[in-house]
Amino acid sequence: MKKLIFVTALIVGLVYVVSNLLAADAQYVGAAKCKMCHMSKSRGDQFGIWQKSKHADAYNVLATDLAKEVAKKAGIEGNPQEAANCLKCHVTAYEAPASAKAATLTLEEGVGCEVCHGPGSLYKSMKVMKDLAAGTQDAKAVAFQTGSDETMCKKCHNESSPTYKPFNYAEAQKLIAHPVPEK
């Protein structure tokens, strides 16, 4: 009996280690990979809600004359769309290593789904998403995060931003809310 318990514990431990190693290999794939399943009205049109948000336009904003003025005042020379100080908050996964970015991830998508939900390569399939919803898939094993929290948001929405405005997390959440409708 002790041997069976030991073997079971060993297998569970190995599954945990392997699943965490797989999650470490997750890549950011871009919002377009989310679109096909998250744009229907019956699912809440999460993609459409994001697409109309300021987050989706975050990279494009850096091309405006106002952004160029703000960058200059902040001591950033050149094009804000090429400045690390700007891109770290205006695009998805800017500071992630190149190996964590799939070719489908683009700067132009701005602040996409994966900023809040984690790199999507391991959970983007319909089967994995259904298993996550059913509670039969370990979210951590596929690098899925249920969403943002105040700490995550304040990595960019803070006093070090040259365009900082007081940040109210509860109000901000309402602006980006995209729940799946209950059936």
Image (cartoon, rainbow, N blue to C red):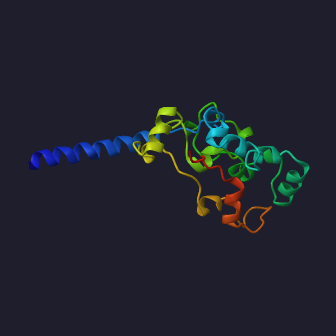
Residue 128, percent across and down?
A: 47, 36
Direction from residue 127 to residue 103 in the image, left or right: right
Residue 12 x/y as whole percent: 27, 45
Q: Quadrant of the C terminus?
A: top right
Up-down: is 112 above or below 172? Answer: above
Q: Nearer the viewer, residue 182 or 86?
A: 182
Q: Residue furthest right?
A: 65
Residue 8 visible within the image: yes
Which x, y percent locates residue 139?
Answer: 45, 46
- The spot of residue 53 in percent (x, y) is 75, 48
Q: Left or right? Give the position of 7 relative to 44.
A: left
Q: Residue at x 62, y 30 (%)?
A: 103
Q: Is residue 93 visible?
A: no
In this rendering, the answer to whether 64 lies above or below 31 is below
**Residue occupying the far left of the picture:** 1
Residue found 69% across the figure and 47% down from its top: 111
Instruction: Name which residue lies at 13% across and 45% down.
Output: 4
